[in-house]
Image (cartoon, helix red, strand yellow):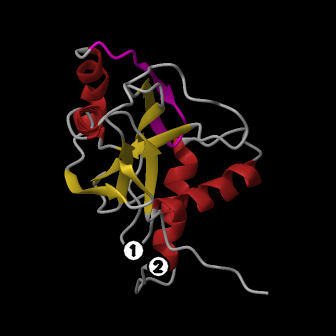
Amino acid sequence: MKKIQSQGVHHITLNGADRQTSIDFWEGVLGMPFVFDQPNLDNPREGHLYFDPGDGRLITVFTNEDRKPDPTRTPNDPGAVHHLAFNVSRATFTHAKDRLEERGISVYGPKDRGFMDSIYFRDPLGFLIELACYRFEPPVGCTHADVMIEAHRLRVERGDYNIHEEHLADAIELLVARRQQSLSSDRAARNPY
C-alpha cells in the first residue's frame, strides 16, 4: 500500500450567498483579485467564482442569487471547517484591524500565537476568517514549515509549553548551518569585541 502524496492546497471552495456579496467580500475587503468565473458545472443554478488569495492558488465560491447573506455563525460541529487563515505582511497586519473596523466589522485580537500574530473576524455569512502574520522569515531555500518543525523539536526538547520567538531564531540558525556551507571549520558563536 502506498500514500497519495499531496503537494499543497489546490483550492478551497466555499458556499457563498449571491454573486455581488462574494465579490465585495473576497476582492473588496480582502483584496483577492477575481480571476475566473463560470457556472458551477455540478449545479447549473449556481455560479462558481475564483479568487487569487495572493499565492496563485485559488479560493472559489459557489454563488446563487436566491441566497442572501446571513451572518449567523456557520456550524462548528465535528467535521465542519472552523476557519480559514490568510497570510498577510506585517505592514498589512498593523492596519488590518482599523480597516475592518472602518467597515463596521467586529475584530477579535490581535492574538499572540508565539510564531505569529492573528486577528479574527467573520465574513458576511458568519464564517470565521483569520489574518495571520508570521514573526519570522525562513532562510533562503526553506519554507515556514521547515522552520516550524525545527522550532517544535527545540520547544519539546527544552520542555517549553508553547513556541516562542527564541525557538524560531534557534531553528533558523540550525537550518542555515545545515543548508549553507562555510570555509570555517568551527562556526560557533564568537565575541569579536
Q: Is residue 117 left or right of residue 99?
A: right
Quadrant containing the C terminus is bottom left
Q: Nearer the viewer, mark 1 or mark 2?
A: 1
Question: What residue type is disc 1 on?
Answer: Gly
Residue 121: image x %, image y %? Answer: 42, 25
Quadrant containing the N terminus is bottom right
Q: Out of 36 and 66, give the one closest to the viewer.
A: 66
Question: What residue type is disc 2 on?
Answer: Arg
Residue 143: image x %, image y %? Answer: 45, 65
The answer to whether residue 3 is visible is: yes
Labels 1 & 2 near each other (Cβ < 8 A): yes
Residue wearing tag 2 = 179
Q: Residue at x 39, y 66 (%)?
A: 139
Q: Which residue is drawn at 73% across and 86% down?
A: 2
Q: Give the answer, above or below, for where 56 lies relative to 183.
A: above
Residue at the limit of the structure toward the front, as seen here: 45
Q: Out of 49 and 38, give the one closest to the viewer.
A: 38
Q: Residue at x 59, y 37 (%)?
A: 82
Residue wearing tag 1 = 141
Q: Out of 67 and 4, give the one closest to the viewer.
A: 67
Q: What stretch is highlighted in magenta?
A: 104-117
Dot 2 lies on which element? helix
Q: Give the answer, above or below, for where 74 lies relative to 160.
A: above
Q: Earlier in the sequence, mark 1 or mark 2?
A: 1
Q: Give the answer, above or below, for where 145 lies relative to 128.
A: below
Q: How crowded is mark 2: few (under 14 residues within 10 Å), some or many (20 or more)?
A: few
Q: Which residue is drawn at 51% across and 69% down?
A: 175
Q: In this view, does 54 lie to the left or right of 126?
A: left
